[in-house]
Amino acid sequence: MNGPSIIFDLDGTLVDSIEAHYMAFAQVMSEMGVDVSRDEFKGHFGKLAKFIVRDQLRSKGIEKDLDECQKIADKKQNAFMDYVDLVKILPGVNEFLADMQAQDVSMSIASNSVRKVIDAILKQTGVGERIDIIISVEDVEKPKPDPMMLNMAARVMEVRPDECIVVEDSVYGLKAAKTAGMATLAVLTGGAQRKNMQDAGADMIVDTLEGIDADTVLSLTQ
């Protein structure tokens, strides 16, 4: 398919999943005798899970190598399944996806989450029914902010990078998109500050996807 195509992030962009991720993370940290507040967790949201573990433990004066942090992150991913019912679709997402589908726009998800978490979220929310392609962190050697997964999504959709619009809620994702040479729509539903998104070079910034005109978004590639 040629023409404008959309690559979405998932957490904080299409779905509100931060409470489910926090509960899973807090549970695993608590088992280690470490307390984590919601605000502390939100400050790291968007990073790979193993880096969240490393940085959170480091802030408490605990040092662990990345292999150990990955094992803890794996436990967090398993615990997430107990909280997936807390995940909700964000305002305007269903309508936005329907508008894009009506215009025969190819859509994909490129997420730093692992596949089983992505699949659980898509099943819980039904978001995946309109998405053609899913790229998880397990499909690439380097996660966002590296552009590798965005470039992979473009190849699978058979479009050029300059035909893609990346919809993101984090600076990490915007950096990846800019490096890939893709247009960007930043949403503030993940908690990022507007100024940070502006500084990251977002082409368009919206509070939510609610009421956003599809043609205006698609024109970002022009």
Image: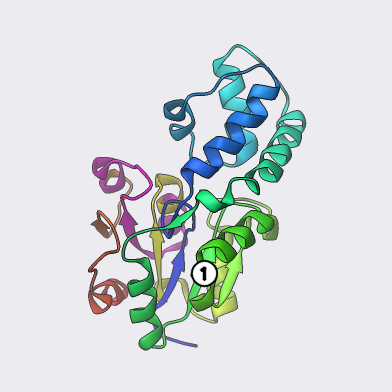
Residue at the (61%, 64%) spot, across then down: 135
Check disc 1: other Cα within 10 Å, few if <14, some if 14-19, many if 20+.
few
Tell me residue 4's x, y (percent): 38, 80
* Residue type, label 1: Gly
Quadrant of the rendered structure where residue 191 is?
Answer: top left
> Observer-nearest residue: 48 or 37?
37
Residue behind mark 1: 126
Q: Is residue 211 magenta?
A: no
Quadrant of the rendered structure where residue 151 is?
Answer: bottom right
Position of 20 relative to 209 (above/below): above
> Observer-nearest residue: 85 or 121?
85
| Magenta span | 175-198
Q: Specify the farthest residue to the top.
A: 61
Residue at the (39%, 74%) spot, across then down: 97
Position of 18 relative to 71 (above/below): below
Tell me residue 67's x, y (percent): 77, 33
Position of 170 relative to 42 (above/below): below
For this view, does 114 lie left or right of residue 38? Answer: right
For this view, does 70 lie left or right of residue 199? Answer: right
Element type where label 1 sits in the image: loop
> Observer-nearest residue: 163 or 207?
207
